[in-house]
Image (cartoon, rainbow, N blue to C red):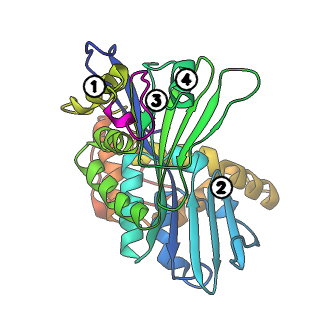
């Protein structure tokens, strides 16, 4: 998963902590029909690294006529009334900050809107213990503006899932597994989701994803020290010192340190192995040709489609690996058979 990883300095309330902050799920709605205006969705499909070869069309859901399933958590419902795209699961997990930025910009460019957006913060270094957090929630030692708390605890094992709020505007889901990490997921719906997408874009551009997600979490719930206050007066109870340290640790970060993000070229290579390898093998076997010949034909076709963005990605990779830079014209005119310098 491409996440933003950052460390909080040690404080009196909590040990030095490591957090993982990321966008984790999105739903996008458009008045355009994916079936008749596929070109309008090119930017969104590119940002989510969708593979056309994996598309399976079936009956639609949620009242739509058709549903295109790309696998790995990318699905598109569409019909006369428009299109709804769901981004979750492995698709969302493999998207880094640059991909989410590209997705948000593509959604804006085509006049679509986000109707759901999930931000997730993971307590990587176990500041909180699972039983400890479960007890805080069960004993209602917190204040929140989100109502309708529901909590699930298995009969065996220490895992739990607690949901604050409803799926109308905002929802907080806290999950923990026995001996595992606590995960906080903030779901935004409707207009809030659309607004938060713009805020997420700004956070990515300024490298403040961690602060952005932590602020959203702090506004959703505030945990308290054990107390005898009733629900009307619980806000007067002292704040839980460990919770304050957890939040303050993130707030004191001056600059986020990112896990090394994969380059566009490395992502293309991974995509080929994850998504296209099977299709290439099927094609090669069905046509009875050598796999190298199949590759050359695909490469020749791909060369015709390269643009300035591709040229930049190619040269950025070559420079980072000590290779000579290629001119834009050279990239566009290079044939599949020649110019071994491209691999030098």
Viewer-nearest residue: 218 or 147:
147
Q: Earlier in the sequence, mark 3 or mark 2?
A: 3
Label 4: how many Cα within 10 Å (few below 14, some 14–19, many 20+)? few
Determine which residue is flagged by label 2: 293
Give the image location of residue 95, x and y in percent: 47, 48
- Please tell me whether mark 3 or mark 2 is closer to you in this view: 3
Give the image quarter of residue 5.
top left
Give above or below for 201 relative to 333. Answer: above
Alpha carbon separation for disc pair 2 and 1: 56 Å
Viewer-nearest residue: 334 or 183:
183
Viewer-nearest residue: 65 or 180:
180
Looking at the rendered structure, the secondary structure element under dot 3 is loop
Q: Quadrant of the C terminus?
A: top left
Contact? badges 4 and 1 (CB < 8 Å): no
Label 1: how many Cα within 10 Å (few below 14, some 14–19, many 20+)? many
Give above or below for 224 relative to 163. Answer: above
Give above or below for 29 relative to 72. Answer: below
Alpha carbon separation for disc pair 1 and 3: 21 Å
Determine which residue is flagged by label 4: 135
- Please tell me whether mark 1 or mark 3 is closer to you in this view: 3
Residue 272 appears anywhere in the view? no
Q: Which residues are magenta?
A: 225-236
Determine which residue is flagged by label 3: 141
Q: Residue at x 36, y 50 (%)?
A: 98
Please state the total of marks drawn on the protein image: 4
């Amino acid at each position: 998963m491409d996440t933003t990883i950052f460390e909080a300095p040690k404080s009196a309330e909590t040990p030095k902590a490591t957090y993982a902050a990321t966008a984790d799920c999105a739903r996008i709605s458009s008045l355009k029909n994916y079936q008749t205006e596929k070109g309008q969705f090119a930017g969104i499909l590119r940002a989510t690294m969708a593979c056309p070869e994996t598309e399976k069309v079936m009956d639609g859901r949620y009242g739509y006529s058709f549903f295109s399933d790309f696998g790995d958590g990318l699905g598109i419902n569409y019909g006369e009334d428009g299109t709804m795209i769901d981004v979750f699961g492995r698709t969302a997990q493999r998207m880094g900050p640059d991909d989410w930025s590209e997705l948000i910009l593509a959604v804006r460019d085509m006049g679509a809107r986000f109707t759901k957006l999930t931000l997730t913060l993971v307590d990587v270094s176990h500041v909180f213990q699972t039983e400890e957090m479960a007890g805080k929630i069960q004993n209602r030692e917190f204040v929140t503006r989100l109502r309708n708390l529901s909590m699930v605890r298995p009969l065996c094992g220490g895992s739990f899932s607690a949901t604050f709020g409803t799926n109308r505007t905002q929802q907080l889901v806290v999950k923990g597994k026995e001996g595992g990490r606590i995960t906080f997921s903030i779901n935004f719906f409707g207009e809030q989701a659309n607004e938060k997408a713009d805020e997420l874009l700004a956070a990515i551009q300024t490298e403040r994803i961690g602060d952005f997600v932590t602020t959203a979490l702090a506004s959703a719930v505030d945990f308290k020290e054990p107390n005898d206050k009733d629900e009307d007066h619980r806000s007067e109870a002292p704040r839980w010192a460990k919770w304050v340290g957890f939040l303050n640790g993130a707030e004191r970060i001056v600059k986020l340190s990112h896990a090394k993000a994969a380059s566009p070229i490395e992502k293309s290579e991974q995509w080929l192995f994850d998504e296209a390898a099977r299709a290439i093998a099927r094609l090669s076997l069905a046509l009875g040709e050598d796999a190298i010949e199949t590759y050359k034909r695909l490469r020749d076709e791909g060369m015709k489609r390269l643009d300035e963005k591709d040229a930049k990605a190619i040269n950025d990779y070559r420079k980072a690996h000590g290779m000579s830079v290629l001119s834009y014209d050279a990239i566009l005119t290079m044939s599949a058979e020649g110019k071994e310098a491209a691999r030098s």
